[in-house]
Image: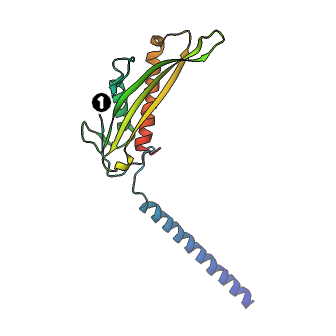
């Protein structure tokens, strides 16, 4: 009987040790997680805490075609996106991050040809060349083209679809630029 009692005591001691180890493991993991958080992440961003401001310089229309207000519309969408999805303050000059560039393409393309050598679908494609400067970490600087398109039926004109398609295209390009600059994607 005495040996059985020792076994129960030993079992109790082992369980107690296991519990202490689990608690210790949890504390260590928690402290490692907290100490590794040198960047903060809100809505998918991975920005250094040192970055507080962003400047969006005017993107310039460097292509024929497109609405006259296309650069202004694009600039405002870009600024609004950073204000909405980060804690960064948009400043007119000398931001910790700076974006600038050109709208280099506003193209109407015929795609999906039919048997009669006509386009089955028309495509509006917009291309933006963005230059990004991270004044806190120059290794993140880049110059890259971003492009997106929307299709519309062959029997319709661009002017019938432009006001519906351009915002969708610009929204996607803004998202792609944001992901490249603030989310490291």
Q: Which quadrant would residue 65 be assigned to in this image?
A: top left
Residue 45 placed where, x, y %?
Answer: 42, 45
Horizontal side, residue 3 vs residue 122: left or right: right
Residue 121 placed where, x, y %?
Answer: 57, 16
Q: Which residue is the extreme one toward the front?
A: 117
Label tally:
1
Classed neighbour count for the residue bearing mark 1: other residues with Cα under 10 Å, few (<14), some (14–19), many (≥20): some
Colour convention:
rainbow
Nearest the camera: 72 or 118?
118
Q: Residue at x 57, y 70 (%)?
A: 22
Q: Residue at x 73, y 89 (%)?
A: 3
Horizontal side, residue 167 vs residue 3: left or right: left
Residue topped by disc 1:
58
Q: Which quadrant would residue 94 be assigned to in this image?
A: top left
Nearest the camera: 72 or 84?
72
Residue 165 placed where, x, y %?
Answer: 47, 20
Q: Residue at x 34, y 32 (%)?
A: 101
Say if 27 sits above or below 94 in the image.
Answer: below
Say if 37 sits above or below 101 in the image.
Answer: below
Q: Secondary structure at mark 1?
A: loop
Q: Quadrant of the N terminus?
A: bottom right
Say if 135 sits above or below 162 in the image.
Answer: below
Q: Which quadrant would residue 179 be assigned to in this image?
A: top left
Nearest the camera: 119 or 177?
119
Horizontal side, residue 112 vs residue 105: left or right: right
Q: Which residue is the extreme one toward the left?
A: 93
Nearest the camera: 20 or 50?
50
Residue 24 placed where, x, y %?
Answer: 52, 71
Q: Which residue is the extreme one toward the bottom?
A: 2
Q: Residue at x 48, y 63 (%)?
A: 30
């Amino acid at each position: 009987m005495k040996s059985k009692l020792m076994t129960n005591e030993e079992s109790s001691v082992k369980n107690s040790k296991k519990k202490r180890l689990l608690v210790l493991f949890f504390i260590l993991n928690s402290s490692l997680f907290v100490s590794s958080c040198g960047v903060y992440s809100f809505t998918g961003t991975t920005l250094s805490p040192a970055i507080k401001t962003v400047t969006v310089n005017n993107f310039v229309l460097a292509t024929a075609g497109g609405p006259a207000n296309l650069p202004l519309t694009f600039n405002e969408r870009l600024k609004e996106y950073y204000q909405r999805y980060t804690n960064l303050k948009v400043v007119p000059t000398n931001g910790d991050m700076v974006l600038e560039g050109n709208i280099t393409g506003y193209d109407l393309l015929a795609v999906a040809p039919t048997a009669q050598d006509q386009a089955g679908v028309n495509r509006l494609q917009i291309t933006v060349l963005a230059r990004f400067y991270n004044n806190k970490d120059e290794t993140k600087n880049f110059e890259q083209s971003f492009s997106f398109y929307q299709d519309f039926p062959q029997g319709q004109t661009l002017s019938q679809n432009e006001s519906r398609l351009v915002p969708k295209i610009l929204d996607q390009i803004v998202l792609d630029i944001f992901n490249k600059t603030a989310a490291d994607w």
